[in-house]
Amino acid sequence: MFTRRPRLRRCKVIRPYSSVTTRAPEDDPKSAGLDPEVPDRIWKQVERLYATGVQPGIQLCIRRRGQVILHRAIGHAHGNGPDDKKNPSRTLLTPATPICIFSASKAITAMLIHHLDDEGLLHVDDRVAHYIPEFAQQGKEWITLRHVLTHRAGISVVPSEYNKPELLGEQDLILRLLCEAEPSSRAGGRLAYHALTGGFILGAIIERVTGKPIRQVLDEVVRTPLGLKDFDYGIAPERLDEVATNYYTGPNAPWPISRVPHQSLGMSFRKATELSNSPAYLTGVVPSGNIIGTADEACRFFEMMRNGGELDGHRVFSKRTVDRAITETAFLEMDFSLLLPIRYGSGLMLGGKGLSPFGPNTRRAYGHLGFINIMVWADPQRELSAALMTTGKPFISRHLLPLWGLLSAISKGIPTT
């Protein structure tokens, strides 16, 4: 009996690669203590990843010792998805194209929480109900901010009937639904990734303790000191066309693997991708999932983190604040939403010696992943910060080996110090 092979949803791979590659200014690798050939060797791996056809657009920015050693983009921002018409009007992706960083937003929101702890406006070990009294329902009165930051609050998934774009403009309704929800496990117990829920709780607390919209807090604490143009929750409606389109690519995952996104997102990858391109998502405020910016901006944020909270003479966070966020809370423990062993800090993911989101031998690295192959991180051992932005949303596909090859090229090409 013959079985049909799953359809591989691919974009058109354009050759030569140089015709769809754009570069921003880069510093001399020698000024960062590197062999001059290192950036091009890393970029060859980016081209291998692009050649799989499941990543319509890729941005990569790497800093080493504060020097921008690689800052390029390949592919298209619009018009080259698997379902786009045969002869579309394609728009090149450039290093300046805004891209949604999805769950990597969690790291930034978490740092705002840690900053407000440092300012004395809250404490991460306080109960959520101290700031949101109506949250103390269904046995959730014991949940602390730290439980939310470390994915142990037991509120990992919103019921699927509530995963609708139009709800994103109803922040009060979202908060009410979370307050009324029954936890799936006791506070502080099972580790289960909170893909969307935790961010809405933390965002509401930020607004209540500061008396300001979370966008204003992000601007005052991060964007203005770092001189970032974008890097905000959502984007202005008049700029929607500037944001790179996300595409559902690769084969459909077979059961039971196909259940993984339902456990973490409450929906399929296809539906999540469609939602991510909706105006409601791109212009709303989703503290755990819709910061929009460039690889350079995300890399600049993590360069600041690597420098202990300071960059170019601007103090953003105290070193104590950074250290608290990256202190290990989950020691390669099984995450029951992602079904993977993960090391967590308090709001950030941590690297590892072998299995790591940031490549091999990256135990001291920290950062976050974004849906699904977005990686933003700092690696103090290598004196580097990096941001890999991708617009294809494959789950399990032929891209995994080239992706690991790219992360390995970065780890091996930039030595530890």
Image: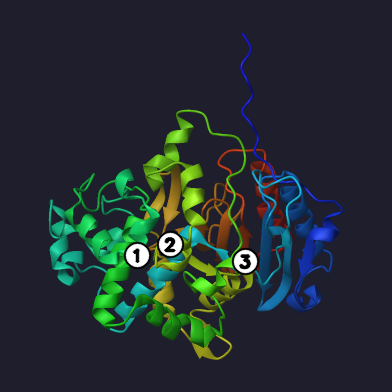
x, y percent for residue 117:
30, 77
Q: Is residue 379 visible?
A: yes
251 vs 105, nearest the viewer = 251
Mark 3 crowd level (few <14, some 14–19, many ≥20, 10 Å Cα): many
Which amino acid type corresponds to the residue marked 3 in the rendered image? Answer: Ala
- Give the residue drawn at x 61%, y 50%: 392
In the displayed structure, would residue 208 be above or below residue 198? below
- Give the residue drawn at x 72%, y 70%: 71
Check if mark 1's residue and mark 3's residue have beta carbons within 8 Å: no
- Give the residue drawn at x 71%, y 49%: 49
Labels 1 and 3: the sequence-earlier one:
1
Task: Give the label on residue 386, or none.
Answer: 3
Task: Give the label on residue 169, or none.
Answer: 1
Check if mark 2's residue and mark 1's residue have beta carbons within 8 Å: yes
Mark 2 crowd level (few <14, some 14–19, many ≥20, 10 Å Cα): some
Query: Secondary structure beneath disc 2?
Result: helix
Which amino acid type corresponds to the residue marked 1 in the rendered image? Answer: Gly
Labels 2 and 3: the sequence-earlier one:
2
Image quarter in which the C terminus is found: bottom right
**Residue 28 in which image quadrant:** bottom right
233 vs 379, nearest the viewer = 233
Decide if residue 185 is on the left or right side of residue 406: left
Give the CA separation, mark 2 to mark 1.
7 Å
Decide if residue 254 is on the left or right side of residue 188: right
